[in-house]
């Protein structure tokens, strides 16, 4: 597989990695979910170079993850807002946060706690079966070929 052609692979994970699979993009998305919207806000919190940040934001806009909305005309400035496609990445980001809290934490504890606004309780993100609601674990899942899979797979 060639890195710059991952978005053309049949594998859904490969196509996703083509869009969000580098550290800066994931950290930019984290900031988006923490309500950062402006270039200066991303740069300040991430300490990323202007060039790298500009490239990653353009890519996220090109793939429809973010949309640019002007907030100033003189000089022309934009906010970067998550689209529905971007908001749909939330479970992925939360799964990574949960893994980090579980396996990469230290004696200080979790850096952020997440509260469900509806019930007011702090929660751990868990993946559940869309059919029965039971928690999913890797050893309890069987994978079948889907309609988008080519007959001959190398």
Image (cartoon, rainbow, N blue to C red):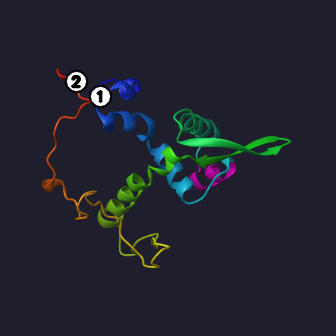
Residue at point 38%, 73% (across, down): 123
The quadrant of the rendering that contains the N terminus is: top left
Residue 56 place in picture, x, y as percent: 55, 38
Q: Is residue 145 left or right of residue 8?
A: left
Q: Quadrant of the rendered structure where residue 7 is?
A: top left
Residue 117 place in picture, x, y as percent: 50, 73
Question: Which badge, 1 or 2, is on the more N-terminal residue?
Answer: 1
Residue span colored magenta: 40-47
Q: Is residue 99 left or right of residue 90?
A: left
Taken as a whole, is the magenta stretch helix, strand or loop? Answer: helix
Position of residue 106 relative to residue 74, above or below, is: below
Circle on res. 10: 1
Number of other residues with Cα within 10 Å of mark 1, as a class: few under 14, some 14 to 19, many 20 or more: few
Q: Look at mark 2 in the image and give the residue it sits on.
A: 150
The residue lying furthest to the bottom in this view is 120
Residue 26 place in picture, x, y as percent: 46, 47
Position of residue 25 relative to residue 140, above or below, is: above
Residue at point 51%, 34% (across, down): 63
What secondary structure is marked by label 1? loop
- The stretch drawn in magenta includes residue 42: yes
Residue at point 58%, 45% (across, down): 48
What secondary structure is marked by label 2? loop
- The stretch drawn in magenta includes residue 36: no
Q: Front-most of 75 and 16?
A: 16
Residue 13 place in picture, x, y as percent: 32, 38
The quadrant of the rendering that contains the C terminus is: top left
Circles 1 and 2 in contact, beta carbons < 8 Å: yes
Q: Front-most of 44 and 85?
A: 85
The residue lying furthest to the front in this view is 131
């Amino acid at each position: 597989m060639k890195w710059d052609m991952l978005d053309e692979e049949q594998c859904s994970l490969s196509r996703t990695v083509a869009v969000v699979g580098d550290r800066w993009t994931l950290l930019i998305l984290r900031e988006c979910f923490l309500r950062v919207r402006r270039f200066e806000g991303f740069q300040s919190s991430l300490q990323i170079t202007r060039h790298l940040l500009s490239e990653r934001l353009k890519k996220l806009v090109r793939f429809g993850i973010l949309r640019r909305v002007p907030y100033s005309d003189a000089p022309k400035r934009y906010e970067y807002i998550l689209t529905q496609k971007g908001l749909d990445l939330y479970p992925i980001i939360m799964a990574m946060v949960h893994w980090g809290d579980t396996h990469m934490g230290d004696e200080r504890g979790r850096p952020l706690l997440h509260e469900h606004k509806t019930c007011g309780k702090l929660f751990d993100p868990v993946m559940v079966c869309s059919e029965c609601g039971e928690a999913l674990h890797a050893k309890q899942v069987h994978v079948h070929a889907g309609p988008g899979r080519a007959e001959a797979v190398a």
